[in-house]
Image (cartoon, rainbow, N blue to C red):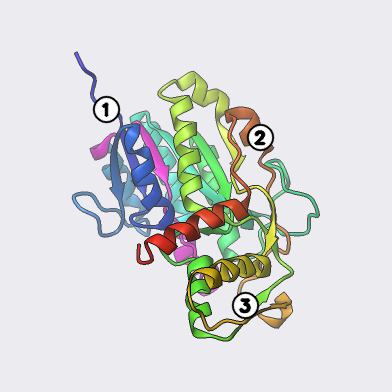
Amino acid sequence: MPTEPRRILILGGDGQVAWELRRTLATLGEVVAVGRRTQPYCLDLMQPETILPLVEQVRPAWIVNAAAYTAVDKAEQEPDLAAAVNAVAPGWLAEAAGRVGAQLLHYSTDYVFDGTATTPYQEDAAPNPQGVYGRTKLAGEEAIAKAGCDWLILRTAWVYGARGGNFMRTMRRLAREREALSVVADQHGAPTWSRHIAEATALILAQLGDDRAAWHRACGLYHLTSAGAATWHAFAERIVEHQRRHETIACQQVTAIATADYPTPAKRPAYSVLDNGKLAATFGIRLPDWRDALAQVQEDLDTYPNP
């Protein structure tokens, strides 16, 4: 008798990571993707009391939470809203996962660190978030760890892709409109392609499968970013250089500026490069260098400019 395919519940609607997950995880089971306006299932994480009924209705084997409040600056003015989505909802989701026997994979951020390090952060480094976004994401991590379900948390950083609102797409648009761009050059991180996050997620889930003992052994925090490091200025230069070779753009110069020259409501970590060694040791997964990934994304956009 053939067995029913496992159900995989993805939260995040059409967000850039969730969009990639819907395609990448389809080979591992029946994907149920949920957002605020999806049908037949929908979920608003600002109302966390609706989480358990949805999870009990879908009864997934795996839950992958790619939903988050990611407006870093706006969070400073909307701390309660950011906390509802990033801190409260993940805890309720983990409790719901435990109720139905599902395993939970959740994404977090480099912004849980204060940026004072000079070498890549490992998972056991002391967190010290500097803004509402980072504090609420850290609170979400802590809530999941306390809930008692089988869980993995993947911290990632500087996420971009061919869809959605992100730094790469913004730079490409501005390069068509402006002769010069000014970009911060004293913040360091690792630009990470949303598709690589989804592909790594699929590899992890395929390895763990439905083996509860394997999930118990693997349970914990992992860092998942592209290899290498960059500043926002270096990232922007690479974007514009490629774009200039493939289309006519207005931009002739990308100028490096200091964070102090571009004040924002939320403080960003000056250094948030993450060490991915634990992920490699546990699952044998290492993402490519950020420059190689960026070239692939832009090649896709050269061929299909309006995804």
For disc 1, the marked residue is 5
Q: Which residues are magenta?
A: 57-84
| Disc 2 element | helix
Q: Nearer the viewer, residue 95 or 299?
A: 299
Residue 170's disc number: none
> Could you tell me which residue is drawn at 34 percent across and 45 percent down?
22
For disc 3, the marked residue is 264
| Disc 3 element | loop
The number of discs equals: 3
> Could you tell me which residue is drawn at 38 percent across and 31 percent down?
102
Of the numbered discs 3 and 1, the one sitting upstream in the chain is 1
Tell me which corner region of the image, top left, top right, bottom left or bottom right, holds residue 263: bottom right
Check if residue 77 falls in the magenta segment.
yes
**Callout 1: 10 Å neighbours few (<14), some, many (20+)?**
few
Check if residue 280 falls in the magenta segment.
no
For disc 2, the marked residue is 278
Residue 40 visible from this viewpoint: yes
- Residue 144: x %, y % from top left: 50, 41
Mark 3 vs mark 1, CA separation in Å: 47 Å
At label 2, which amino acid type do we have? Lys
Q: Are circles 3 and 1 on residues that touch, CB within 8 Å?
A: no
At label 1, which amino acid type do we have? Pro
At label 3, which amino acid type do we have? Thr
Mark 1 vs mark 2, CA separation in Å: 30 Å
